[in-house]
Each structure stands twice: as C-alpha cells, then as structure tokens.
Image (cartoon, rainbow, N blue to C red):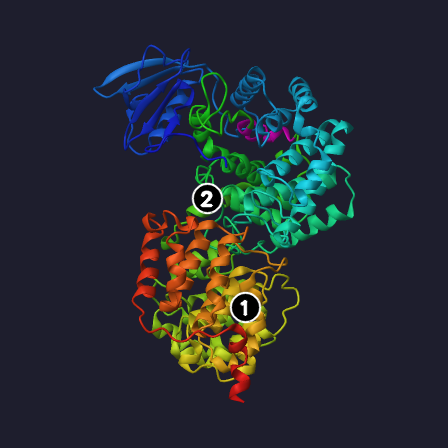
Amino acid sequence: MFGTAHAAGPETFQLGPTGLCGTIEKASAKITKVDKGSPAEGKIKVGDEVVGAGEKNFKRDVRQELADAIDQAETEKGGGKLTLTLKGNTKVDLQLAVLGTYSATAPYACPKSEAIIARAAESLLKAGKLADSVTHAELLGLMATGEPKNIAAVTKAIQSADWVKPDAEKIELLLKGEGDMGYVGWYWGYNLITLCEYYLLTKDASVLPAIKIYALGLARGQDSGGLYGHRMASPKRNGRLPGYAQMNQPSLSNFMGMLLAQKCGIDDPVLAKGVATTYAYYATYVGRGGFPYGVHGPNSATYNNNGTSGSAALCMAIKGNTEGVRFFSQMAATTYDGMENGHASTFFNPLWTPLGANLSGPEVTQQFFRQSRWLQTMYRSWNGGFSRFGGNSKEGNQAGVALLTYCLPRKALLITGRGADETLWVKGKEAVEVVERSKTDYKKKSVDELIALCGSPFPQVSRAAVWTLREKEGDFIPRLTKLMKEGTKREKMSAIEYFGYKCPTNQALAQMELVGSILRNKKEDPEVRAAAAGALSSMGAPAYAYYNDMLALIVDDEPGDTFRDVDQSVGKSLNALCEEPFKAGVVTDKALFYKAALKLADHKRQHARADGMQMLEGMPAEDFSIVADKVMHVVENKDNTYHSYHSPGGSIGSGVAILANLNVREGMQYALDVLDDPSGKGSFKMRMVMDALAKYGGNAKPILEKMKVDPRFKGVPENKKLSKQWNNMVKAIEEDKNPPKLRSLEEAKQISKAKE
C-alpha cells in the first residue's frame, strides 16, 4: 500500500524544477530521465552526471545543495538562471521560472510561497481527476487555499465522485465479513477527513449522509482495542482484523475522520463509543513516546514514525486534549529531517508531520519550514506540480500535500490550523529549541544539565540524558539517589533507569536495595514501581530476592491503568530477570506465581500474554491442572477481546511449548492450526509452527512427512528467511530417535490428581 514504484536498485529522485530525475551518488546525480518541455530538455541527456550547481561542486548532500542552488536561481537577482556542472567540468545553464526569495517568515508573509501555491493549485486543476487518489490530498490541498475557484473545483469533483455515494447495504455486508473489503481501513478514514473538511468549509449538506455512513462503518469496524489495519474487523473473524492486524497510521486517520464527523454534527451512540474506544488507546501514548508501526507500546527512543506524531497531534487537537497536542506536535516539529522515512511508503510523513508541527504555532512552523523546505524544492516540478520520483510512482502528484504545508498560514481547514489553541504556541528561543530538540548533542552537556533533563516531559530526552550520564565522570550518584527518593515522577523513573539496563554492575548493585524498596512501596506510583522492576531485571541473580515483589505488583490492581501497561511492563521484567524460574528456584510462593502468570495470560495485549505463557513453560507437570484452562484459552486464540494478535510466536507458541514439555499430543495440531487462522502475519505464523514442532522432536515425524508435501509449506525449505529454521526443525525431529511417550490433553490434566 502506497509503496513506491521505482525499480530495484538506487532510488531515482526528481531533481526539483529542472525537469531532471536521477540517482544520487556520493557527490553527483546520474540522470535517468529528462522531461519534454522542461528547462533541461535539449541541454542535458540521460546518462549525464551532474556534479555541481551554481558556483560549487556537490560535497555533503547532493539534493540539499542542489535545492539551495535552485532557490538562489529563482530569486529576482538570480533571474532564473541555474548553472549545472556536468562530469568533465562542462557547464550548462537552465532557465527556471523567477519566483522570488523566501521571506524569513516563510511560508508566512512570503510572496514566493504564494507564487508556489498558485502554480501548484493550477497544476492540479489542469491535471483533473481530483477525486481519484486514496488520501484525497489534492482535494484537501485545494480547499486549504481557501480560494473560491479552487473550492468550486473541489465541489464539482466531490459531487461527481462515486465514493461520495457509499452503498450502505454493501458496507453492511462488509462489516458482517461478507465479500472482499479491499483496503477500506485506509479509504474510509481519508474519505471522512475530506468530506468533513469540505462540509465544515462549505456547509454543503449533501455530503452529510456519506459522512454518517463512513463514520458509523468505522466505529463498527474497529477491533476491541479501537484500532484498524488494512481492513475492518468482523464477526466472522471473532472481531479481529485480518492479516497482520493493527497499524497506527490508518488507525489515526480513521480516528481523525470519526472525530471530524462529530464536528459535523453526527451524533450517534455507536460513533461516540467508537471514538471513546480509540481515544482511550491513543491517550496512553501522551508523555510516554512515539508510535511504532503496530501495537507494541510507546517508543521512548523515537519522536515520529511515518507521520504518526503529526496525525496524533491533530487528533488530540480535535478532541480537545491540550496536553496531547503539545506532546505530539512538538515531537513532529523536531523531525523536520526525517520526512523521507517511513515503513512501506514515505508519503505520510510529508503529509502529516508539518500539519502536526503547525499546532505549536507560527514560529515553530517557520523554523520547521526553513529546515525542511529543500525537500519541497526537490519535489517541486518545473510545471508547478510536486513529485518525489518524477511522477512515476503510486504516490503520484504530491501538489496537494505541498499545498497543505504552504497554505498553513491561511488556516482554512481544521487540519491546517483553523481554530487552533493559541495558548499552545511556542515563541522565540523556545520555538527554535523545540524544532532542534532531536539534534541535541548530549555529550556536550554538563552533568548538571543532564540531570536537569532527567525531568523532561519528553522521554526521548530523559532517556538520552540517562545514557549519556553513564559516560560522565564525577560523584553524581548521590544526586540520582535523591531523585529516586524525592523527584517528580519523570525524575524518579529516569534516575531508576540509570541503574538498569547496561548500567555498570558495581553501580547497579550498590543501589539494588533502594530500587527494591521503591518496587515494594505500595504508596508509590505504579509506573515508577514498574520502572524499578525493569531496573532490577538487569541485575541478575542478586535481584532474585525481588521476584515475588514483581509478582505481587502484577497481581495488585492499578486503578486508571486501562490497558494494564504496568502488568505488561513487569511481565517483561520478570522474564528478563529469570527465564527459567522453576529451574532457578525463585518460585517460592506458587499461589502468587500462578496468580500473576494467569493474570498476564489473560492480558489483551499479545506480548503480555506471551510473558505469562513463558513463565509457565518450565512448570512441574503436576501443576498443569491449575493453569490448563487458561493455557488452552490462549492457544485456541479465539478471544474477541484481544487487542493484538499479529505474531503468534510468543503467546500461542509458548502455550504450545508448555504442551510440548508435557508431551501433549494435541499440541502439534494446535500449532498447525495457526496457519489457518485468518488473523496474524503469514511469515510469523510459519515461524511459530516450525519452532513449536521442533520442541516435539521425534514425536513430530509423522507431521513432518505431511508438511513436506503440504502446499502451504511449498518453497519454505528454500526461502532465505525461513530455510534455516526449517532445517533446524527437521534436524530436531529426525535426529530424535527416542522421543518420550505422548499423552492426551485430558491425561495431562489428570497428572496432579494422580500425584495426590
């Protein structure tokens, strides 16, 4: 979806308004295409190598240096003359349009920006087919201009588009699981965003029926966690999403669409419930980190991923969560140099990141634009359009995306800042600091400065400060221990983290008792206690004394922890501290142990279930009846309240490992059945099956013989990514000449009774 369509090998980029496309070498651009009618036609040919622009040869970054030369050439002083240097020192002059000079406040109060807006809008009007793209960026971009002529063109396009007349009966069947949905997990959200912005701008009530149909369809098609994938969840899939399930990028656009539908006056309890469910999930990321691709919890190391911080900032603005707007907007603002990063496609970063950053105010927008406008220059075509790869990809003309950024000062749409909360605007020196936050050189910070950053509201900052502190000399440990005792919540967690993963052993163990006391303090914030568990998990055997305290933290209820993030965190710490608790002798309170493991096994998140199952892998056979029902519940994987289920290796795989350790015959079939489950990523499921069957050794030989002729496994032995695991499985099965006797599941359940 939205993947680029250029050929394998070096990427081919459009080289701004020159009419050229080329691959980028270390200090040159090798030309692969010359547009007819462009400034470069007849002057440069395919195969030429451009090594410089203006008065300089390329040195550091070909595209940025070329963009600078283009912007200089387009000034009144430059007269549109761009001199390119070809390999062999041949000089070629191209005549570009004279667009003027960017103002210091661009895109605000900037004649050049206005000229670019006019040309981009005109290129879209000439191209036609305005309602054909998936994201409708062209329609949104034209509306963002606020100009009657462009809005009239949008009205005409919307009134004639098929997607504006959704078939309610067909959608009803799709939500029941009948028929192929296509990629509605993407389409419906962007349909809603476009129609809602159009209605709010024009008050054209003819689109309200479509808005309601799409909004209720999304509200009904979310999974139990309020999220989306390529498609909707349905009863035929146990309320699950198909394939590899949830993705944050379409989930956020769908969330935005539903929120905007409410702004349009769609008042329905189904929609209200859908919004509340999705909001509950995304609110948990505020102050905790950026978004991963799927459901993996907040990422405290990165600021943005595929434009999701920008999307989230807009969603929080529409919802009225000012804390969320500030957090996500500033995270988007500091990723001005990462807009070409993204899983599967880079399209979403240029679309959403500038819009999210804009919510921090004009001065942040100006700083962001100044740092990233070279990208706009490179995407800008000689005929006014925009394209990253010269129009030869699925991303196509990106003039609409560019218009949304250039038109931010006009604030015509909600997503371009109309009605934005001005109390969140950052000004002066602070605006520069916000944009440059991700470029902080922590190594140049003093100990005092780093300790001060431990209280940053951005975990990316406090994390980097903690890691850098470990490289500093001096007696600052007492200050960290004081923070653990008396600091703010963030300061406590940062100081605790210092003594965790990768901390020098002597420093960590010296503070083990203090960290342990925080874990045991039931009056302390549960997240701080969970951080203490995380630090202890890196201290090895000396910290085994706190194993039961971690179990107790899981067993205890944490009011307000909607998604049981604390339990998930501590479950991970338990297995990091001790992978084989029975063998290590740390299970001294079986009742507490099994209660914690079963609570994790009942978690809605896949990774937490996996940790619960992993804890049980080495359990005594006589205890199986205590956990058998819950183990089978996880292995059968039919619970429609689960929030994540893309990779069965941890949860189902560990469950089958428990059965394998007990020589339960049915476990082999349960492993194979995973391949027929409509949810989950195919390659992940295949890996889980091979890993599980290897644990059965020689007992799985009959299964192996069937697998060798099973069409589902065709090509697996030769697959580069799977062949090693296949060979390991075959070896484990074929070399085990004396496997233990298999027993039935019911026989395994009866072992404990027989022991009695």
Q: Is residue 706 magenta?
A: no
Instruction: Work out whether residue 337 can be spotted.
Output: yes
Residue beneath the point at 49% across and 85% down: 588
Q: Secondary structure at mark 2?
A: helix
Q: Eyeballing the image, is 623 above or below 289?
A: below
Q: 321 and 175: which one is in front?
A: 175
Which residues are the magenta region? 401-411
Q: How many marks?
A: 2
Residue 265, percent from left and from top: 78, 38
Quadrant of the image occupied by residue 107: top right
> Is 718 rendered above or below residue 706?
above
Q: Say whether residue 425 is visible.
A: no
Residue 209: image x %, image y %?
76, 33
- Percent x, y of residue 569: 52, 65
Question: Predominant secondary structure in magenta?
Answer: helix
Reply above or below: 205 against 651.
above
Which numbered disc covers residue 436?
A: 2
From the image, which quarter does the C terminus lie in? bottom right
- The residue indicated by pointer 1 is 528
Dot 1 falls on a residue whose secondary structure is: helix
For marks 1 and 2, give the CA distance. Answer: 29 Å
Name the amino acid type tagged 2: Glu
Q: Closer to the camera, 593 or 193? A: 593
Q: Is residue 373 left or right of residue 315?
A: left
Is disc 1 surrounded by few (<14), some (14 to 19) or many (20+) residues within 10 Å? many
Residue at the extreme bottom: 756
Amino acid type indicated by mark 1: Val
Which residue occupies 58% across, 76% down? 595
- In the rendered image, the residue lying farthest to the left is 88
Q: Residue 154: x and y, percent?
A: 66, 22
